Image (cartoon, rainbow, N blue to C red):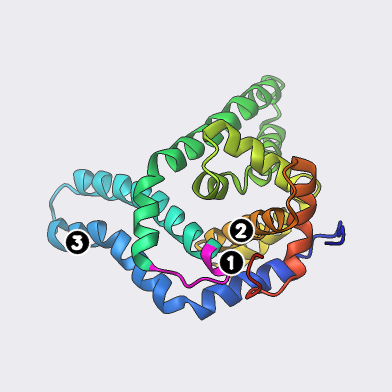
Amino acid sequence: MADNRSFSVGRVLGRTFTIWGSNIVTLTILSAIIYSPVLLHAALAFPRPGEDATRFVQVQNVGQFVLSLMATAAVIHGVFQQLRGQPIKIGACLRVCLGRFFPVLGVALLIVLIIVVCALPIVFAFSATGLAFLAVAAAMVVFILLYCMFWVAVPAAVVEKPGVGASLTRSQALTKGNRFAIFLVLLVIAASGQPLIRRYVSSSCFGSASSASSCSGVSSVRNSRRSFMSVTRSPISSPTR
């Protein structure tokens, strides 16, 4: 496979929306099954006018957080299978989301912890000078850099199962040299008003990288990164050989 050092934002988004559009019924059913507990709770326990809604809101927030992680794991597995030329099976996705919940939770919490630890000293340093605007701006820059760096850490945890810390390392390697392009992709997602598409984009990119790595027989991080950049130009339906 030729070494292609350009990252095509358009191709990444095009691949993502193609996968989403061709599997929208299956993915909608999958999401409905996963989110059914909070939907059922909302239907049965919605507070009446005048009642205290604090407990209801707390249960809903916790439930949506937990189920969003499970939905992310399920979608990642499904998209990865699609990239390998296999159909998305709801049963298999549900098994994966249950089996990989705690690793995904660990990765998500570790990313938040790293961002907070890195951003807080900068915020305090600028705040001490009385420049609140610069403190907020610096914190946003740190957040964006780290978020783009660890963008495919969750797909790594679901697909390759290397462990929590190793998933972040894997993401750091795969995104190196392409983080500005990833930032542009995230801007397009934000502008579209469809934040859930982020799951399909990140898993699509990681699935492509993993498939290309196994196809070429490359095991080093450097060549895996090259595969990540080159597979975005290959057809979606091309199975791994």
Label 2: few (<14), some or many (≥20) within 10 Å? Answer: many
- The secondary structure making up most of the magenta span is loop
Looking at the rendering, the stretch of residues picked out in magenta corresponds to: 81-89
Query: Taking 166 as reference, is 13 above or below it?
Result: below
Residue 185 on the magenta segment: no
The residue depicted at 19 percent of the width and 61 percent of the height is: 40
Query: Taking 85 as reference, is 230 above or below it?
Result: above
Label 3, secondary structure: give it.
helix
The residue depicted at 67 percent of the width and 54 percent of the height is: 214
Label 3: few (<14), some or many (≥20) within 10 Å? Answer: few
Residue type, mark 2 in image: Gly
Residue at mark 2? 207
227 and 132: which is toward the camera: 227
Mark 1 near mark 3, Cβ–Cβ under 8 Å? Answer: no
Residue at mark 3? 40
Residue 82 on the magenta segment: yes
Residue 91 coordinates in the image, percent (x, y): 33, 64
The residue depicted at 52 percent of the width and 80 percent of the height is: 22
Mark 2 near mark 1, Cβ–Cβ under 8 Å? Answer: yes
Residue 186 coordinates in the image, percent (x, y): 65, 58
Among numbered discs 2 and 3, the one appearing first in the sequence: 3
Among numbered discs 2 and 1, the one appearing first in the sequence: 1
Q: CA distance from mark 2 to mark 3?
A: 33 Å
Q: Which mark is residue 84?
A: 1
